[in-house]
Image (cartoon, coloured by chain):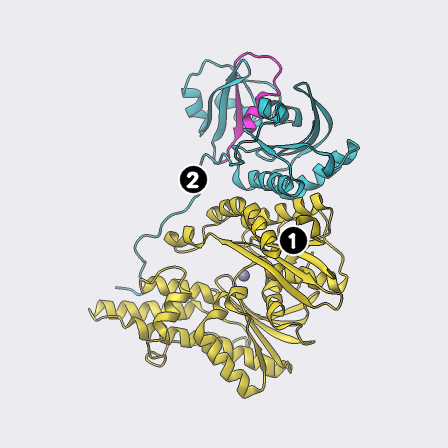
Chain colours: A cyan, B yellow
Amino acid sequence: MLVLALDTATPSVTAGVVELAAGQPTVLAERGSVDARAHGELLTPYAREALAEAGTGMRELDALVCGIGPGPFTGLRAGMVTAAALGHALGLPVYPVCSLDAIAAGVPDPDPLLVVTDARRREVYWASYAAGARTGGPHVESPATLVARELGIGRAAGHGARLYAEALGFVEIPPAYPSPAGLVRAAGAPLAGGEPPGALTPLYLRRPDAAEPGTRKRVSQP
Amino acid sequence: MTGKIVLGIESSCDETGVGVVRVDPAGELELLADEVASSVELHARFGGVVPEVASRAHLEAIVPTMRRALTAGGIELSDVDAIAVTCGPGLAGALLVGVAAAKAYAAALDVPLYGVNHLAGHVAADTLEHGRLPAQCLALLVSGGHSQLLRVDDLAGKITEIGSTIDDAAGEAYDKVARVLGLPYPGGPPIDKAARQGDPNAIAFPRGMTGPRDAKFDFSFSGLKTAVARWVEARERDGEPVPVNDVTASFQEAVADVLTAKAVRAAIELGIGTLVISGGVAANSRLSTLAGQRCAEAGIELRVPRPRLCTDNGAMIAAVGAHLVAAGVAPSSLDLSATPALPVHTVSV
Ligand SMILES: [Zn+2]
């Protein structure tokens, strides 16, 4: 099965072409760069380049996998709308994956770990994992709040672990960002078994900033 | 089926629009579909468009709106020959959703992509209703987001701004005045409705930017909005009832007077025989009536698309794309990005 994996929930813009056979992903080609402001610009060109390098094309694909966050809103939407439109145009299923799960799926050993990414505004997105399954999260909160939870897990993947290394004090382990192989692995049995995908709904975790207007300010002096 | 099918995607503010237009070899357009999903009700309680709320709504709406447009137009995605998308001006996060979607559709269908200017779209909307524009025309764009006078020499490439608002857009002034009077958001329709029962000469509200030293073709609506608020507050302070109908009629008269006077004067001075009025405020009854009178007196042809085409929609973006296709303009690159402050003279990128 030929899969295109996309993620824009972190500062990394990730696109990869993955062959999935007997549950094992093999990455045929990938493109990625860390540029939080260029998600919308780079993602489609990256997907085309990866497909070309893999010697294939959009029409040969069997499925799409897309990270659904949590992630800073604007960048996250670039990847999700790209996946949704590609899925519609190509008539393919789009499998949603929590982007933190995709990072965790890039860690080879099964010992407990945290995945921490940057949520901006001095907060992090995080989730905890053990034996390849999510055990907590995803949440958004300050590094201090995460530490105060005393989860008893000493190591963390994800670029947020480095960004807040001082406040968090975890042992940093790779990967820092979701990879195409991690995304496909995290899509798991539904993708491998050809089951219908779940809803492609973003994990925003925060409400939009919007204040209802209070009483009208007078323009004239009383 | 002769001609080319152009799909247009619009997401610059609070409307998710997808339109389908066919352009024949002679450059004549036929509107096949025009589907819009609006998030306006989600913004009502905030009294204005909340960018993040709009962006979230675009992400949810874009593929369903696309499906509806294809069904309404009786076409398949495989029939599409080109895709046009608004790449600016507009809200950054909102634009990005449409641009990213358009790029994905263009890449998947392997068809050319045109990143186009939203303001050119408002002018092009008229060609869907009234056919080709003359070699030269003047366009007055008035909505919640824009108030501009444009000289249009070529819809596929040459549009020049000759005047714009120096502060609020006309539609913004409507929203603010509505709030002062306790009328709902958006302010245009309730003000227009109340004003029909009022006396437009009851209160002499100021006409901004009409002094001898003011820029001839620029607008200002901030002073007018403040003048209305002061007038209403004075009545409230004196414990007198506020004559909402007369206030709205007099406010609306001031807006329509300035807009039409400047547009007609520009047409006369530039020797242009056709005026197009488009944008959400173009649906305003007093503006169209007064523009009709003044254009008739000055011997200027007035063109106003039906209200449905005046507000933001995907069909107007497909129309710009169709004019670009017909003119043989080179398409955009797939690394196209949203440009929130795209200047009007950049019709396509
Ligand atoms: Zn507009």
Taking the image as shown, residue A43 lies to the left or right of residue A96, namely: right
The mark lying in front, picked from 2 and 1, is 1
Residue type, label 2 = Arg
Residue B211 visible to an observer of this rendering: no
| Position of residue A105 measured from the top left corner of the image (x, y, whole percent) | 59, 21
Residue type, label 1 = Ile
Residue at horizontal 67 percent and vertical 40 percent from the top: A90
For this rendering, which residue is in front, A95 or B272?
A95
Look at the image and say whether residue A102 sits in the magenta stretch. Answer: yes
The residue singled out by tag 1 in the image is B75
The circle on residue A207 is 2
Q: Which residues are magenta?
A: A99-121
| Position of residue B25 measured from the top left corner of the image (x, y, whole percent) | 76, 65
The circle on residue A32 is none
For this rendering, which residue is in front, B184 or A165?
B184
Tell me where residue B26 sits by quadrant.
bottom right
Which quadrant does ligand 1 occupy? bottom right
Q: Provide the chain ID for the residue under circle 2.
A: A
* Some atom of ligand 1 lies within 8 Å of the CB belonging to the residue at label 2: no
